[in-house]
Image (tube, rainbow, N blue to C red):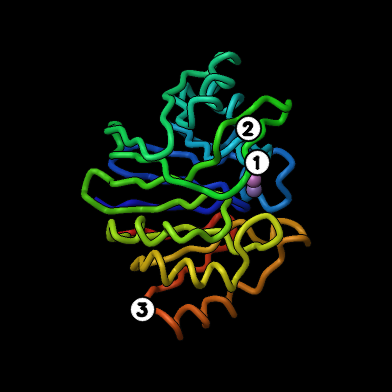
Amino acid sequence: MATKLTWYGHATLGLETGGYCLLVDPFFSGNPAAAITATQAAADYILITHGHGDHVGDTVAIAKRTGAIAISNFEIANWLEKQGVEVHAQHLGGGFKHPFGYLKLTLALHGSALPDGTYGGNPAGFLLTTNDGKKIYLAGDTGLFGDMKLIGEEGLDLAVIPIGDNFTMGPDDALRAVKFLQPKHVIPIHFNTFGLISQDAEAWSKQVHAATGTQVHILKPGESYTLA
Ligand code: NI
Ligand code: MN
């Protein structure tokens, strides 16, 4: 049972695992890098790392169209529920066994205000243990933090981390993050959406390969990587 990850541009990901379709940070409308439109996106569950507009994105419209359950921190889940979305609230450090796997919310160093100014709680990352035991860490928007070492101790098969700089880790700190996390595979995201976060992912990949045992997979928006 493989898990297929598709990068739709910016921080938007699709994960197909165990027959379930997960959509992460579904930012399609207004996303210059988006590979598909919000109306084309499939989802059984929508995972939202934090409240910023480029992450909450099209959650409400997609959830209402697909009937997907939104999973996020308590504050964001409440905000979505008030708009008619079915939700499952969790919080930092807390895990839950969903039908698609065990999902834990991890720390992230960032902000989380919602688009209308509502308090969005603390930002998060996700640590997913798939039903076949694969560990996938989605860092969300974050700066480098030392407790990534603790996340790495879980034994990661795949990490998806930002490298765009300015709003999140840049390439140098993302390399240090790979050293802390020690994943078997890493995919860089949250770069090249717009000029402020343009990065040379190929150059970063060479640095990671020279300094660590981690395999880098650079996707273009719309491309997939399958974790077997
Ligand atoms: Ni953000
Ligand atoms: Mn962002």
Lower position in the chain sequence, tag 2 or tag 3 = 2
Residue occupied by mark 1: 28
> Where residue 58 is drawn, which disc sits there?
2
Percent coordinates x, y for residue 158 in the rendering: 37, 60
Mark 3 crowdedness (10 Å alpha carbons): few <14, some 14-19, many ≥20: some
| Residue at the limit of the structure toward the left, as seen here | 132
Return the residue at label 3. Answer: 213
SS at mark 3 in the image: loop
Q: Give the image location of residue 58, x and y in percent.
A: 63, 32
Tell me the amino acid under the disc marked 3. Gly
Residue 97: percent from left, percent from top = 27, 33
For discs 1 and 3, the disc positioned in front in the rendered view:
3
Q: Is residue 64 above or below residue 21?
A: above
Quarter of the C terminus within the rendering: bottom left
Quadrant housing residue 178: bottom left
Instruction: Name the side, left or right, on which 129 lies relative to 143.
Output: left
Marks 2 and 3 close (CB-CB < 8 Å): no
Asked whether disc 2 touches disc 1, contact meaning CB atoms under 8 Å apart, the reply is: yes
| Residue that appears at 44% across and 83% down | 211
Write the residue at 65% across / 61% down. Answer: 191
Q: Tag 2: Cα neighbours inside 10 Å, few (<14), some, or many (≥20)?
A: many
